[in-house]
Image (spheres, helix red, strand yellow):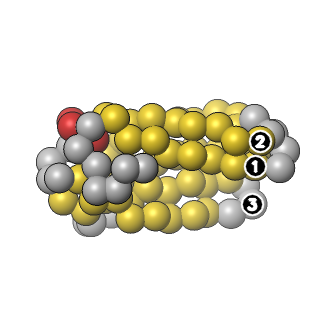
Amino acid sequence: YPNPASAITVIPVSTTRKIFGNIRIFNTLGQLVETAFSGEFPAGQSNYFIDAARYVSGTYFVELQTGEQTILKKLVVR
């Protein structure tokens, strides 16, 4: 949040236990734009940040990937 974004954007992550994973940003062509985080997510709620002002306006996808699952959310940058 916020979404649509235009500056610092928060990516909240909630896990029940420590787990290794990645947060990656892709454009609509499926090209990797940024790896926002790679490492161990702590148990509980954590916030990770990206600077959407560095991106060209348009639609992106935020991917949260762990060994157990992959979650994809749409992010619109103004």
Circle 2 residues within 10 Å: few <14, some 14–19, many ≥20: few
Image side of residue 42 versus residue 39, left or right: right
**What's the amino acid at mark 2?**
Gly
Q: Nearer the viewer, residue 42 or 5?
A: 5
**What's the amino acid at mark 3?**
Glu
Relative to 37, does residue 17 appear above or below in the rendering?
A: below
Image side of residue 9 versus residue 45, left or right: left
Image side of residue 58 versus residue 27, left or right: left
Image-quadrant location for residue 38: top right
Relative to 23, does residue 58 appear above or below in the rendering?
A: below
Contact (Cβ within 8 Å) of mark 3 with mark 2: no
Q: Where residue 73 appears, x then y in whole percent?
A: 46, 64
As measured in the structure, the alpha-carbon distance from the residue carrying label 3 to the one carrying label 2 is: 17 Å
Q: Which residue corresponds to the image point at 75% horizontal and 49% vertical from the top-left? A: 15
- Residue that numbered label 3 is attached to: 68
Contact (Cβ within 8 Å) of mark 1 with mark 2: yes
Determine if residue 23 is in view. Answer: yes
- Residue that numbered label 2 is attached to: 44
